[in-house]
Image (cartoon, rainbow, N blue to C red):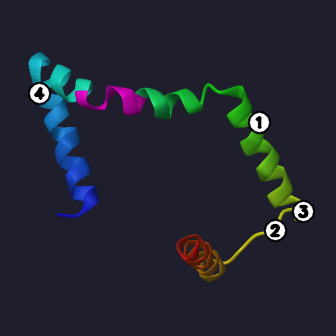
Amino acid sequence: MKTENKKQKLHRYIETADEKKLKAIYTMVEEEIEETSDLWNDEEFIAELEQREKKYLNGSSKTYLVKESVARAKQAVKKIKSK
């Protein structure tokens, strides 16, 4: 089943689930939800994103093609494994 289908099924299920089932589901993912949502309230995180966006838009940051990024990641992994 594709991810999008899973998401749709979960959304439909959550909309109709009773309180006991909602509590159980929420308990399983609560910590992850809190970690994710806290980032958007973190002033340092937002400032960093804004700084990176400015650098990207004015052309002062180095950007990479996907192929270049993958090659660099593979090279880094290879270097770590050889140690």
Residue 47: image tag: 1
User: Magenta part of the protein: which range?
Assistant: 28-33
Amino acid type at mark 4: Ala
Name the residue tied to disc 4: 17
The amino acid at mark 1 is Ala
Q: x, y percentage for residue 72? A: 64, 76
| Identity of the residue drawn at 18% across and 32% down | 14
Instruction: Name the residue tied to disc 3.
Output: 60
Q: Quadrant of the N terminus?
A: bottom left
Cα–Cα gap, marks 3 and 1:
17 Å
Between disc 1 and disc 2, whose residue precedes? 1
Majority secondary structure in the magenta region: helix
Q: Earlier in the sequence, mark 3 or mark 1?
A: 1
Q: Amino acid at mark 2?
A: Lys
Circle 2 sits in a helix, a strand or a loop, which is it?
loop
Tag 2 residue: 62
What's the CA distance linking mark 1 and mark 2? 19 Å
Q: Earlier in the sequence, mark 4 or mark 3?
A: 4
